Image (cartoon, rainbow, N blue to C red):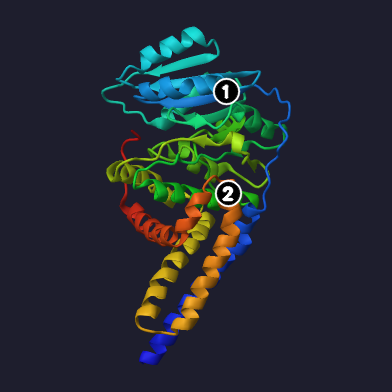
Amino acid sequence: METYIKEALVLLFQFCFIIQLYYLVNNYSRLAGYKPMEELLPVNIPISVIISARNEAKNLQHFLSHILEQNYPDFEVVVINDCSYDTSDLVLEEFEKKYKHLKVVTITEHDRFKTGKKFALTLGIKAAKNEHLLFTDADCMPASANWIARMAANFTTPAQIVLGYAPYNRSKNFLSPFIRFEAVKAAINYFSAALNGEPYMGVGRNLAYTKTLFFSAKGFASHMHLMAGDDDLFVNQHATEDNTTVELHPDTFVYTDGKSTLASWYRQKKRHFGVGKYYKSEHRRMLSADAISGYLFYVLLLICLIFSFEPMLVIGIFIFRLILQIVIYSKTFKKLDARDLLWFLPGLDFCYYIYINTFGLMATFIKTTQWK
């Protein structure tokens, strides 16, 4: 009986390795070989940048000018002041005096009717005068003054959705390496899927789509009851191989700070994972296969080593996977401004699969009632 258990565990370990190998070679290698367009094309497509802000006075003061002073000939910035009770209104009034292409939409708090970010974004989209919409958050800063120009250039193609990249800033906070690694892994997943013709999500800190697509899809109506999902659920429901493209030039990266405490990070992840169960079934299967096989790979690795079940074979498979990860990830992590994280790859990868399965399981019971 013990022999059968040993053989079953070793075989299951190898099976998990094969699944992981499939994702590395078939999916992630496509992103590793992807090259963004270096030339900055002359584009003059009118763009509306939309930012929903709730109690973001300090961030608006610090970051909004970097949006308003983009090197682009025809754009407006629509800021939705969503029930703020700080000094956001005063900050925005000062910006309006200086920048004529800033439009402010104000939402006031109602005692009986509580609104979320999707309601605020819907009002901002309705207020936008342009067909092509570019989204970010109040605490975000574009890497360059050409952010709008390069994102807008993608609308010269048949694309209706443009997926941009939004990394986290490096910091000395103890959570920073893992927060950055998790964001990079998520980006690898959704950019690789999009390049393989299976787009399934985007990040609202750097995302563009057309107003026509938004209203023809009835906006966020199908998931307005969920606090999160204004970005990934919308993309999941409406992105196709033909209407979606990616933009990964470093000029288009939009940076923000990661959470600095476990409590705030937990609340953010709880909100994000709460909508994953509403993804299309094929996308849930795709993500689950990677998450579960990665988790079992490490669990079975430890079990086989502790009980000396084919230790040389198991160690050999682990080292082979690690080398393959480094070969593929070295290009990808460099592309995504995270090359320094490769030094900690084994530990971060192990923690990532523990984390994603834990939160994935918790998401079954999660109900989020506020977005900020």
Q: Position of residue 258 (x, y in %)?
A: 39, 40
Q: Earlier in the sequence, mark 2 or mark 1?
A: 1
Q: Secondary structure at mark 1?
A: strand
Bin the neighbour count of mark 2 within 10 Å (Cα to Cα): few under 14, some 14-19, many 20 and up. some
- Name the amino acid type tagged 1: Ser
The answer to whether residue 147 is seen in the rendering is yes
Question: Mark 2–mark 1 contact, CB under 8 Å?
Answer: no
Say which of 135 and 67 sits in front. Answer: 67
Of labels 2 and 1, the one closer to you: 2
Position of the C terminus, as image quadrant, is top left
Identify residue for label 2: 334
What residue would you read off at disc 1? 48
What amino acid is labelled 2 in the image?
Answer: Lys
In this view, the residue in front, 367 or 267, is 267
Residue occupying image coordinates x 31% and y 43%: 267
What percent of the width, then of the height, locates residue 142?
Answer: 53, 30
Q: Quadrant of residue 91?
A: top left
The N terminus appears in which quarter of the rendering?
bottom left
Give me the disc on residue 266.
none
Q: Is residue 176 above or below residue 100?
A: below
